[in-house]
Image: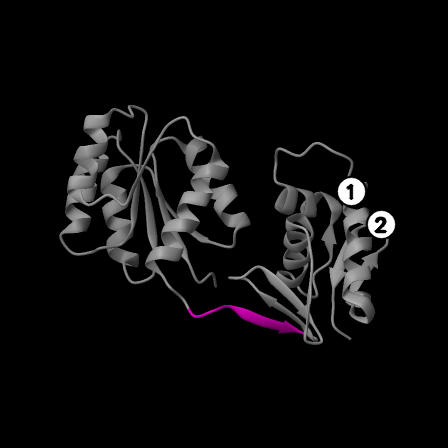
Amino acid sequence: MPDITVLVVDDESRMRKLIKDFLIQKGYGILEAGDGEEALTVFEENQNKINLILLDVMMPKLDGWSVLRQIRQTSKVPIIMLTARGEEQDELFGFELGVDEYISKPFSPKILVARVEAILKRTNPAAKEVKDYGGIIIDAEGRTVTVDGKQIEMSLREYELLKYLLDNENIALSRDKILNNVWNYDYYGDSRTIDSHIKKIRHKLGKKGKYIQTIRGIGYKFEVK
């Protein structure tokens, strides 16, 4: 069960799917609502587990401002407003009502995810996340990797690839799936770039590089034996 749950509220199903796809890649749980009334119902039923709300302004039944007002009567959950207007007066109005962030459409999904992560980090100061995978210690907050007490220098992409493998321990991952989740949808290069990165990571991990197994005809799997 994901530790972080985001409620995505937008009357456009394509927009909800786009946002949902990118947030799921980051491991977030998603709840959805297609109008203001549904948003309030979903929020009331799941208030204790919702960590952040992405809330569209222009919606049928109840607009985003009305939803925001009602939620703010009982909750301080972080809220990012999504709007097509993007006028300064709207932004000021939103902040007065208790909006934490304000993003105008159209927006880059990657920028949206970055804003979500920044707000969650600010509002949910969780304990430092350090995990040990058979002697490979990864510090998600500091983005560091340590093997047998020695910190390993890695590029950002190497780190993200290794962390994705670790997060999916004992699961065989296809090259396409790795590309979609580590390089994201905007990458159109050759999947052999994964093989090159894996080779470098194995070398840096030393003897523990053997934990990254090649699954013939599929891709790779991280498994401690």
Viewer can see residue 149: yes
**In the figure, is residue 59 to the left or right of 96?**
right
Classify mark 1: helix, strand or loop.
helix
The residue where tag 1 is placed is 193
Q: Amino acid at mark 2?
A: Gly
Coloring scheme used = one colour
| Residue 96 percent location from the top left of the image | 15, 40
Q: Does residue 190 show up magenta in the picture?
A: no
Tell me where the magenta segment starts and ends, as one range. Answer: 127-133
**In the figure, is residue 170 to the left or right of 210?**
left
Q: Quadrant of residue 39?
A: top left
Residue pictured at 19% horizontal, 45% vertical:
98
**In the figure, is residue 108 to the left or right of 171?**
left
Marks 2, 1: nearer the viewer: 1
**In the figure, is residue 168 to the left or right of 94?**
right
Q: How many marks?
A: 2
Q: Quadrant of residue 137?
A: bottom right
Q: Earlier in the sequence, mark 2 or mark 1?
A: 1
| Residue 99 percent location from the top left of the image | 24, 43
* Circle 1 residues within 10 Å: few <14, some 14–19, many ≥20: few
Q: Amino acid at mark 1?
A: Thr
| Residue 29 percent location from the top left of the image | 45, 54
Q: Does residue 130 show up magenta in the picture?
A: yes
Which of the numbered marks, if any, corresponds to residue 217? 2
Are the residues tagged 2 and 1 within 8 Å (C-beta)? no
Image quarter in which the C terminus is found: bottom right
Residue pictured at 41% horizontal, 26% vertical:
106
